[in-house]
Each structure stands twice: as structure tokens, then as C-alpha cells.
Amino acid sequence: MLKRKILIVDDDVISVTLISELVKRLGFDFSCAFSGEEAMKIIDNSFDIVITDMHMFKISGNDVARYAKEINSFARVILCYYPMHIKPEFELFDNIIMKPIEFNELIAAIS
């Protein structure tokens, strides 16, 4: 059975570290991007799940989600964010998790 592959996208190193540790413990293969721009350079159809923040410099989580779905329409995109001034385009996301992240909620979203 193939492992699912996850891309974690967030400009906050602590958030990336926490999510990375969780998905590693759950046995997922994963990659990390520390900006929307970096994510768009590495997104390909090998990622089953993209976990993204909304508020990043230049390229938002909306842009990352839209691009991920263009590359792989079967990819699940999970938004992890603090509600602020940039509004998510809710239809782009398969799951939405508010920060601070509850690990049980994230586990349910990626399982």
C-alpha cells in the first residue's frame, strides 16, 4: 500500500515543525514549503494532501489551494489559519482548521 504524501505550507517555522512532527509520527511522507511561492514551485500530482496557512507574504492560501487543485484535482487541501482580514475562499478547501491547531482535529482531517 502506498503512503499518502503531504505538503505542509506555512511561513511560520513553529507551525511547520509541529505539523511535520505529527504527520511523521502518523507515518506519512511529507515535504515542507515556507511560502506560497515555494509551494507553487514544488506542488505536483504526487501530493495527496496539501495543508496550508492562509496569511503568507505575496501568495495566500487561497492561491496555493487553487493551484494545487489545478495540478491534481483529487488532492485534498486543508486550511489551517487564524481568522483575520484575508477571507478564505471556502469552496477551495476540503477541511478548515482554526489555529491554534487541535491535533485530534488535524488527524481527523488527514485520515
Image (tube, grey):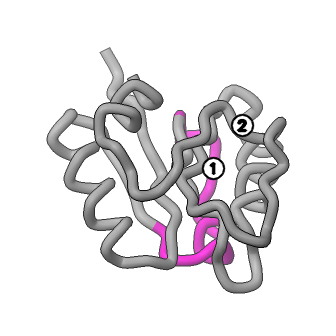
Viewer-nearest residue: 45 or 23: 23
Lower sequence index among marks 1 and 2 = 1
Q: Which residue is mark 1?
A: 44
Query: What residue do we see at 52% from left, 63% from top?
Result: 9
Identify the residue at horizontal 46%, vertical 57% (top origin).
Answer: 99
Question: In the rendered view, would you say 11 is above or below 92?
Answer: below
Let me know if residue 61 is in the magenta part.
no
Q: Position of residue 106 (x, y in %)?
A: 39, 37
| Discs 1, 2 touching: Cβ within 8 Å | yes
Say which quarter of the image contains residue 13.
Answer: bottom left
Q: Nearer the viewer, residue 67 or 90?
A: 90
The amino acid type of the residue labelled 1 equals Asp
Helix, strand or loop under label 2: loop
Residue 12 occupies which quadrant of the picture? bottom left
Within 10 Å of disc 1 (Cα), the crowding (few <14, some 14-19, many 20+) is some
* Residue stretch in magenta: 33-48
Task: Single out the residue that lies furthest toward the top.
Answer: 1
Q: Looking at numbered disc 2 in the image, what kind of residue is underneath it?
A: Asn
Distance of mark 1 from mark 2, alpha carbons?
Answer: 7 Å
Image side of residue 44 versus residue 89, left or right: left
Q: Nearer the viewer, residue 11 or 100?
A: 100
Q: Position of residue 4 (x, y in %)?
A: 40, 30
Q: Is residue 43 magenta?
A: yes
The residue beneath circle 2 is: 72
Q: Quadrant of residue 15?
A: bottom left
At 64% across and 77% down in the image, what residue appears? 56
Q: Position of residue 61 (x, y in %)?
A: 70, 61
Residue occupying the far bottom of the picture: 57
What quarter of the picture does the C terminus occupy? top left
